[in-house]
Image: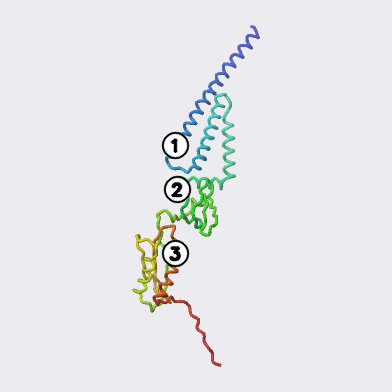
Amino acid sequence: MNLENIDTQKWIDLATEYGLKVIAAIILWIVGSWVIKKILKTSRKIMTKSSYDESLQKFLLNLLNWALKILLIITLLGTLGVPTTSFAAIIAAAGLAVGLALQGSLGNFAGGVLIMIFKPFKIGDLIEAQGEVGVVKQIEIFTTKLTGLSNREIIIPNGALSNGNIINFTTEGTRRVDLVFGVSYDADIKKTKEVLMNVLTSHPKVIDTPAPTVNVLELADSSVNFAVRPWCNAEDYWAVYFEVTENTKIALDAAGIEIPYPHQVEIQRKG
């Protein structure tokens, strides 16, 4: 038996075996890449149709792209005869380590995804959350930025934001301003209600529907307290709050209706 012929046949067999695997891997890569592009294109259409935030779309599409490519590479290695069990174990261990190290960040990321999907608020809304009140300035993957009422920038982690109570003052478009004014027990209740109602109906930013209301709230120790409830557009809340308060004091003084306040009585001792 000719050793040269045996070696030649061995190389031919090896080339045939691995050549077919390489060709299969190339075909798999081409087909797999095409399938990945189709999946990403379809996913983008679904996200756009569902009105996903643009930043969330880019992040999720990049995440999906890398996950599919890693899966494709592992499949290619398996096609070439490379054991893939060790690769899967390494990836799983790395994923667990990263997850433990970034537990807080992942919670904020998950919160950001939930906020962008369910949209409890949008940019420009006035909200109260985590003990802070402000206008939503920016919604990011990990944090949400608010502009506070005193023009402070407030940054709230999305994990805490998505897990806590959120009050959105803008959603309904209108807000009720809750005010309480106290007058003397000597004041005429009917006249006082007329004065207070005139203050509300004459204010240009107090809306007619829902209608403003004035009612006796309680008979306190030293005053009769009235619940004054005007309605306004959400963006006019503080203007109505401050201006109605000021106008009420002026109107009550003009009508001769006293607003009770503590008096100091000096007692002169004879001696």
* Image coords of residue 195 (percent x, y): 37, 71
Q: Give the quadrant of the N terminus.
A: top right
Instruction: Give the percent coordinates (x, y) of residue 29.
Output: 53, 26
The residue lying toward the viewer, choosing from 115 and 73, is: 115
Q: Is residue 168 above or below residue 256?
A: above
Q: Indicate left or right for 14 with 255 as reference.
A: right
Q: Are marks 1 and 3 in contact (CB under 8 Å)?
A: no
Q: CA distance from mark 3 to mark 2?
A: 29 Å
Can you tell which mark lies on residue 45?
1
Q: Residue at x 38, y 79 (%)?
A: 186
Q: Residue at x 40, y 55 (%)?
A: 173
Question: Disc 3 on helix, strand or loop?
Answer: helix
Q: Which residue is mark 2?
A: 119
Which quadrant of the rendered structure holds the C terminus? bottom right
| Residue at 55 percent of width and 26 percent of height | 76
Mark 3 highlights which residue? 241
Whole-percent x, y for residue 203 in the image: 39, 65
Residue type indicated by callout 2? Lys
Residue found at the very far top of the displayed protein: 1
Q: Position of residue 34 (x, y in %)?
A: 49, 28
Per the image, label 1 sits on a secondary structure element best described as helix
Q: Dot 3 surroundings within 10 Å: few (below 14), some, or many (20 or more)?
A: some
Residue type at mark 1 is Lys
- Name the N-terminal-most of marks 1 and 3: 1
